[in-house]
Amino acid sequence: MKPHRDPMYLEHVRMTGRALGCCICEDTSNIHAHHEPRFLSEHADTAYTGGMGEKASDYTAVPMCSRCHGELHAGVLDHRFDGDLCYLERRIMKSRQVCLMTFLAAFRGE
């Protein structure tokens, strides 16, 4: 099963980030739609994570500024939070929920 692709949803994630800020630091500039396939710790997310080298579903994307995005991919983001991965996971999950809920509400015309 291939991961879902939805350019409209990715644009919604970027718009949400420009309005509410990065899911990590709340900066509203230079927002990217980061595909977050799993939690940062050893616990697995229930979302489809994709194959090796394959991007996760667009519905796993969260708004992230370029600084946090770069630090996450470099593996140094947790140092800003004294290694508190649970805190980072909660922020990412909350942001993902907000994006999905507001996208569905807009889609239904609410």
Image: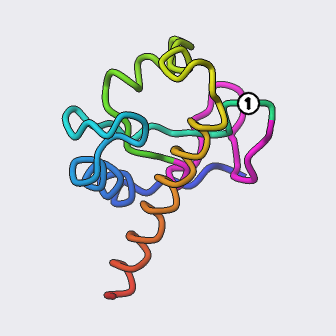
Q: Nearer the viewer, residue 26 or 101?
A: 26
Asked which colour scheme the image uses, the reply is: rainbow
Residue at image coords 33%, 88%: 110
Q: Is residue 94 left or right of residue 37?
A: left
Say if 91 sits above or below 98 in the image. above
Question: What amino acid is found at the position of numbered circle 1 in the picture?
Answer: Ser
- Seen in the picture, residue 6 relative to 54 is either above or below; the reply is below
Residue sitting at 37 percent across and 51 percent down?
10
Picture quadrant of residue 7: bottom left
Q: Residue furthest front?
A: 82
Residue 19, percent from left and from top: 22, 54
On whether residue 80 falls in the magenta region, the answer is: no
Report the number of discs: 1
- What secondary structure characterizes most of the magenta part? loop
Task: Label 1, secondary structure: give it.
Answer: loop
Q: Position of residue 12 (x, y in %)?
A: 32, 58
Depicted 109 relative to depicted 98: above or below: below
Q: Confirm whether the magenta stretch covers residue 50.
A: yes
Residue 62 on image: x %, y %: 45, 46
Q: Is residue 106 left or right of residue 18?
A: right
Along the viewing direction, whichever of 79 and 45 lies nearer the viewer: 79
The residue sitting at 64% across, 30% down in the picture is 85
- Magenta residues, as a range? 43-60
Residue that carries the numbered disc 1 in the rendered image: 41
Compared with 4, 90 (above or below) is: above
Mark 1 crowd level (few <14, some 14–19, many ≥20, 10 Å Cα): few
Q: Position of residue 94 (x, y in %)?
A: 52, 54
Q: Residue at x 44, y 37 (%)?
A: 34
